[in-house]
Image (cartoon, rainbow, N blue to C red):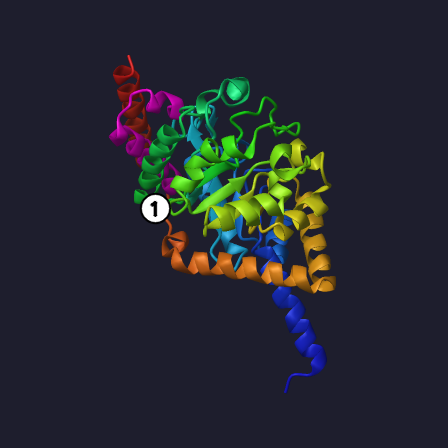
């Protein structure tokens, strides 16, 4: 018979496991290390995210993701950012993928979907099951120097059209996509990696323009990634949207009706760290209604955020309920998306050559049809 002390210990361990499911983590290096293995085993995160710094070859990437999964009992979100063009983590392994802007310029819906399908197949072959793409920020002049070819149009209907087809292509390849960067960085002239963009735009214009793709695709996005930008005409302050209950719970979930998973952009970015240290940023993202905290670089930051989430949940019942709600959402999502636990076969040189050839042919098709 379990004693009261045993039950309390079990409850604490259950809560710690719940909190792990609120984290997607990045790390340095190209292979499993004792330190990374220890972190994965103790935190049991919802997912991992790889960047170009982690990716040397197809087989090495696949093995690294397999080794990460071996440390964690629940299927991982195995994530990457692969939009094509400027944001292309597999460029040096499979080849350069055309940008969203280049593909959209051809004005062929079949090519939009093919773009997603080819990128998805490349992701899947290397072991990824989540691609944080496409960006559905609007291509306004203000953000041109920051976002450039990542964006397709200043027209929200055209942006939603491209995104719908791209997402369908990813899904056909067995990869989940994500809308980003909610509520929209189209009017931002600062890079949120380094500073906090403060976007002075009325609620009426945001609703009609920047938020229109999210309204149109609220049932299509498996994930929505929330930006580290402030919108003081809506909130009355310069709190980043990623930490704002008004934006996440009030607008994205209640007003727009989005029911998928909500992730922060990387909480190590300057745009959010200007507002809060990493520990507080993680707590406030979850408190605001977020499900997943991305912490993409330093293992120290992962540990600090995890420990603060645990500590806050232990002393704040309302926050503990918020944690449990998001953990249940993440686990239910993983159970429903059975493809998450499936793996392609180890990518051979022949597989990589075939993928590279197909990607090159697609790039040529886009180039020639865009002339």
Q: Residue at x 54, y 29 (%)?
A: 185
Q: Is residue 114 visible?
A: yes
| Lateral position of residue 9 relative to residue 52, left or right | right
Residue at the spot x=33%, y=20% of the render? 105
Which is nearer the eye, 353 or 206? Answer: 206
Q: Residue furthest front?
A: 204
* Residue density around tag 1, few if under 14, some if 14–19, many if 20 or more, within 10 Å: many
**Could you tell me if residue 135 is visible in this image?**
no
Residue at left offset 51%, top offset 45%: 252
**Residues rendered magenta in the picture:** 96-125
Residue 241 horizontal/vertical position (percent): 60, 39
Measured as percent of width and height from the top left, residue 329 is found at: 50, 58
Q: Is residue 226 magenta?
A: no
Q: Is residue 357 above or below residue 289?
A: above
Report the front residue among 32 and 136.
136
Residue shown at 50%/44% (left/top)? 64
Provide residue 8's location: percent of width, then percent of height: 69, 74
How many tags in the picture? 1
In the image, is residue 81 above or below residue 259?
above
Q: Secondary structure at mark 1?
A: loop
329 is higher (above) or lower (below) than 236: below
Q: Quadrant of the N terminus?
A: bottom right
Residue 120 counted in the magenta span: yes
**Above or below, comparing residue 366 to residue 330 in the picture:** above
Q: Position of residue 219 (x, y in %)?
A: 38, 47
Which residue bears the numbered disc 1? 174
Main secondary structure type of the part rendered in magenta: helix
């Amino acid at each position: 018979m379990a004693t009261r002390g045993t039950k309390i210990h079990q409850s604490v361990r259950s809560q710690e496991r719940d909190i792990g499911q609120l984290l997607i983590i990045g790390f340095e290096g190209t292979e499993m290390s004792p330190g990374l293995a220890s972190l994965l085993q103790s935190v049991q995160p919802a997912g991992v995210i790889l960047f170009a710094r982690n990716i040397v070859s197809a087989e090495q990437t696949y093995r690294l993701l397999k080794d990460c999964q071996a440390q964690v009992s629940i299927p991982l979100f195995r994530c990457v950012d692969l939009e094509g063009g400027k944001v292309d983590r597999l460029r040096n392994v499979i080849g350069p993928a055309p940008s969203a802007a280049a593909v959209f310029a051809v004005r062929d819906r079949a090519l939009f979907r093919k773009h997603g399908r080819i990128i998805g197949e490349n992701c899947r072959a290397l072991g990824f099951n989540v691609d944080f793409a496409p960006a559905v920020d609007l291509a306004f002049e203000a953000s041109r120097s920051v976002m450039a070819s990542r964006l397709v149009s200043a027209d929200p209907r055209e942006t939603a059209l491209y995104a719908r087809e791209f997402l369908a292509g990813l899904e056909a390849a067995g990869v989940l996509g994500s809308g980003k960067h909610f509520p929209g960085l189209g009017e931002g002239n600062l890079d949120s990696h380094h500073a906090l963009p403060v976007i002075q735009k009325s609620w009426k214009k945001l609703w009609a323009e920047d938020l229109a793709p999210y309204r149109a695709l609220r049932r299509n996005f498996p994930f929505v990634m929330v930006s580290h930008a402030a919108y003081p005409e809506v909130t009355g302050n310069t709190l980043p949207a990623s930490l704002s209950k008004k934006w996440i719970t009030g607008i994205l979930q209640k007003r727009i009706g989005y029911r998928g998973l909500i992730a922060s952009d990387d909480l190590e970015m300057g745009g959010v760290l200007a507002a809060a240290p990493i520990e507080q940023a993680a707590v406030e993202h979850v408190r605001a209604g977020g499900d997943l905290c991305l912490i993409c670089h330093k293992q120290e930051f992962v540990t600090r955020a995890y420990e603060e989430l645990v500590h806050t949940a232990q002393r704040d019942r309302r926050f503990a309920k918020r944690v449990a709600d998001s953990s249940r959402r993440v686990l239910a999502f993983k159970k429903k998306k059975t493809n998450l636990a499936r793996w392609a076969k180890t990518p051979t040189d022949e597989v990589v050559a075939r993928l590279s050839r197909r990607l090159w042919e697609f790039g040529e098709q886009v180039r020639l049809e865009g002339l």
